[in-house]
Amino acid sequence: NKEREKRKDEHVQLALLDDRLPPSHFDHLTFVHHSLPNIGWSDINLHVVLPDLDLKSPLYINAMTGGSEKTGKINAELAIIAKATGIAMGVGSQHAGLRNESLADTYRIVRRNNPEGTIFANVGADVLLDFALNAIEMLEANALQIHLNAPQELIMPEGERDFTGWLSQIEKIIKHVKIPVIVKEVGFGMSRNTLRLLKEIGVQYVDISGRGGTNFIGIENRRREKQEYDYLRGWGQTTPISLLEAQEYMNDMMIFASGGIRNPLDAVKCLSLGAKAIGLASPILRVLQNEGTERAIEELINWHEQMKTICTMLGARNMEELCAFPLVITGEVREWCEMRGIDIVAIANRGRL
Ligand code: FNR
């Protein structure tokens, strides 16, 4: 148990290092500027209504902390931030709190500090159904995130080595859980092949959590004595590529985007590619740890205002309209799409402009 608590604290420390590999694929996506937006700032509506999930904001704080004393304190602050800004939030994997009652409070504090908030529970895909139900109950959660993190486990010295049966376990959980189940990556992105398998078993909500921000191969590699896996840090699909891989599923599944979202423009680009919500993990952790709770609240309020500014500049009143604006895709992302047969010419020429 002490080992696990130490690991949770190390993850936070290492995530703050920010050793992202450039370039960001978000820089390969460019909106076409239009000189006649014909709307006003107050026309913008960023409210997101989804089946069984009502989000006042498309932004949410993604799964990170809990399971040790220090990360429990971070959870308490994140909950205050979520409450003050009205945004949804996830907690880190609850396995520690499920196995050890004395750690359950490091998660429960989130509900205590934000009684009316939208909160996501979090478990791994290998979890037994009863554990998943207990994780939901622990938080009176509004949705359950199931994380997929095979690369992280493999590089983690003490990690899991057998990933057999995840899909059937997810299927079982979905059948029994009455709140939305969000299947998420942890920063390696998804492919259309992964999405097809998830859709076939009835998954409705997915967070493609792509490469470009927090890098768990990098983090776990630093926890290894020899740090021999540095060369694998580029593994996985970036967030823009994952959203492009997901294009054919945008109408039948609720796709969330996270991973390496640096600023409000990156967030608006995700929405324009069809994402229904945008998860931020390390950017919020960093402001909270370096500058405190009040600054983190301010930062999120600024993100909202600036997202509205960008929407006004484009002339898009809401998410639906955003998805009808042309986005030009260049560089490595374009090459990827050409090889994978993803129609980016249609995206560059869509809509009424
Ligand atoms: C995470 N993430 C994560 N995800 C998850 O589903 N369960 C977890 O326990 C954790 N733990 C965790 C700890 C820390 C310190 C960080 C920074 C992140 C992954 C997170 O939810 C997200 O998918 C990635 O961090 C990518 O987003 P960012 O950080 O690039 O915005």
Image (cartoon, grey):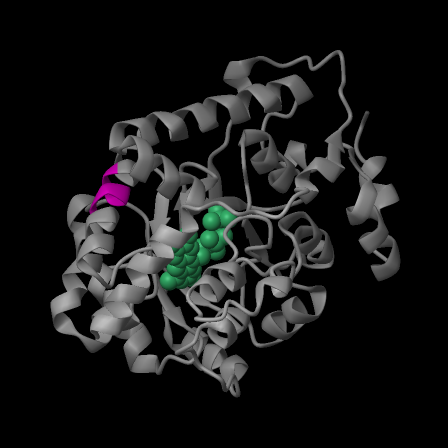
Using residue 102 as the reference point, say whether residue 107 is left or right of it: right
Magenta stretch secondary structure, dominant: helix
Q: Nearer the viewer, residue 321 or 70?
A: 70
Q: Nearer the viewer, residue 54 or 18?
A: 18
Q: Nearer the viewer, residue 246 or 4?
A: 4
309 up-or-down from 69: above or below: above
Using residue 255 as the reference point, say whether residue 84 is left or right of it: left
Residue stretch in magenta: 76-80
333 up-or-down from 86: above or below: below
Estimate the x, y position of residue 286 in percent, counting from the top left.
Answer: 38, 40
Q: Image quadrant for the C terminus?
A: top right
Using residue 287 as the reference point, say whether residue 66 is left or right of it: left
Estimate the x, y position of residue 170 in percent, counting from the top left.
Answer: 47, 77
170 up-or-down from 266: above or below: below
Estimate the x, y position of residue 213 in percent, counting from the top left.
Answer: 54, 48
Estimate the x, y position of residue 74 in percent, counting from the top left.
Answer: 25, 47
Q: Quadrant of ligand 1?
A: bottom left
Q: Is residue 223 visible?
A: yes
Q: Is residue 156 magenta?
A: no
